[in-house]
Amino acid sequence: MTEIRVDPSAGFCFGVQRAVDKVYEMLETGRPIYTYGPVVHNETVIDDLKAKGAIVLETEEELQALDPPEGAAIIIRAHGIPRRIYELLETKHIEVVDCTCPFVIKIQKLAGEHSRAGEHVLIAGNPKHPEVEGIVGWCDGPVDVLETPEDAEKYPFSEEETYFLVSQTTYQLNKFTQIVEIFEKRGYNDNVVNTICSATQIRQQHAEELASEADVMIVIGGRNSSNTRKLYEICAARCPETHYIQTLDDLHLERSKIVRLVGITAGASTPKKSIEEVQKYVRAYF
Ligand code: SF4
């Protein structure tokens, strides 16, 4: 008998849930509703929001060109935005509904304060991720993004500067620890704040534990979701048969070996419905 175990922390975190709920709630008012970027990295949810009338502005240029109709509102997603986008929004006649996650606001504030104090801000994260672009946009002085521990190894520290290190909320904890150790080894250990959010830490920890026991591991999440990709990396390192799927259609299981335990986890952008569908399918399959 195959056991199917779903990680209890899988799926929408509170920051994403709050933003998605807000878009649905605003759509019910019948007003023109925009979001700045997709509110969640999940095509199924975004298609549904669009079908209900949400308009997604993908770029800063699109926002610049926007001439909002009477009564329009724009929702800022959980990832947050750079300061200059707030300034741009002030020039538009549009209500701004800010759903930046409080964990992200904390990093923006920290980065801004330390930057204004003359420190060189370093962010452990993906430089192309909107959350990181947002944090960079709150710094007034020099700022660099370190994507991997290797970047920390070869980072050209300067004796003249004081550094301040934070992390993207969804950064992998063991990589952040490695970066901090590299900094210490190189003599820069003063200003470090681990800003990985607790929802991410707990989910990564559960995924690691589950993948260590499972014969088959399934990770559900959007292709563009960085936290899902990290979950996949963690699981694949412990369970060789780890599947990264966006929806049930992507799942191709093999029945050739004995499977005692199937573990299921999901990124912060995966709705409960998708997790339940996969769980139901896997239960019927084995
Ligand atoms: S992953 Fe964490 S920081 Fe990001 S939206 Fe969710 S709760 Fe907020």
Image (cartoon, grey):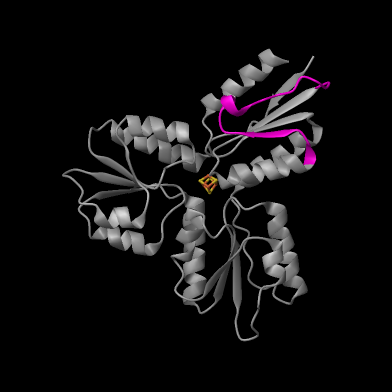
Rendered residue at 47%/49% (across/down) = 101
Magenta segment includes 109: no
Q: Where is residue 158? Give x, y as percent.
A: 64, 83
* In the image, residue 252 lies in the stretch drawn in magenta: yes
Residue 203 in picture, x, y percent from top left: 65, 40
Res 199 seen here: no
> Which corner quadrant holds the N terminus?
top right
Q: In the image, which residues are magenta?
A: 238-259
Say which of 212 and 217 sits in front.
217
Left/right of residue 71 with respect to residue 128 in the rendered view: left
- Does any portion of residue 246 appear in the rendered image? yes
Majority SS type along the magenta span: loop
Outermost residue toward the right? 258
What residue is rendered at 32% in x and 57% in y? 61
Judge left or right: residue 151 versus residue 115. right
Residue at the image point whose x is 57% and y is 52% from the top? 169
- Image height check: is 127 above or below 154? above
Q: Looking at the image, which residue sits at the far left?
A: 70
Q: Quadrant of the C terminus?
A: top right
